[in-house]
Image (cartoon, rainbow, N blue to C red):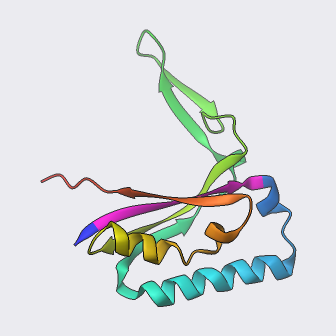
Amino acid sequence: MAKYLVLIYGDEQKWDARTAEEEQANTEGHEAFRAAAGASVLGGHELESTTATTSLRADATGRLMVIDGPFAETKEVLGGYYVLEASDLDQAISLAGKLPEVHAGHSGVEIRPIREHD
């Protein structure tokens, strides 16, 4: 069995502007995904807003720079993730395709294989 990181991206302003009903529908969509995926879900979390992000980078001298916010200036931000165990990429795609963000007009899902090290 392989492991896959499923990254959920979207427009943070649109996520923040959801109505209570839209938020409930999204929550129910994730509950349905977790129920369908069952033991294939090894973990996952929703992330706090990018306003709570701290990024690290070293300058040319090797001095650590602490930066508020994400590196990228983009509308689409990482909003959450799941770690899945699947027999192959096709199964990972089938499972991740059930996430509500796949079907929202402003968001999407990236599936990346996890490289295991001994």
Q: How many marks?
A: 0
Q: Who's the residue at 61% across and 60% down the image?
A: 108
Give percent across and percent down for residue 90.
36, 71
Whether residue 36 is situated above or below residue 41 in the rendered picture: below
Q: Who's the residue at 86% across and 63% down the image?
A: 17
Q: Is residue 5 magenta?
A: yes
Q: Who's the residue at 53% across and 68% down the image?
A: 45
Q: Quadrant of the C terminus?
A: bottom left
Q: Nearer the viewer, residue 71 or 58?
A: 71
Q: Nearer the viewer, residue 108 or 61?
A: 108
Q: Who's the residue at 49% across and 72% down the image?
A: 96
Give percent across and percent down for residue 85.
32, 73
Give percent across and percent down for residue 34.
50, 84
* Residue 9 position by quadrant: bottom right
Q: Is residue 35 left or right of residue 23?
A: left
Q: Nearer the viewer, residue 63 or 98?
A: 98
Give percent across and percent down for residue 95.
45, 77
Q: Quadrant of the N terminus?
A: bottom left
Magenta residues, dominant SS class: strand
Q: Is residue 75 magenta?
A: no
Q: Which residues are magenta?
A: 3-12
Whether residue 77 is situated above or below residue 83 in the rendered picture: above
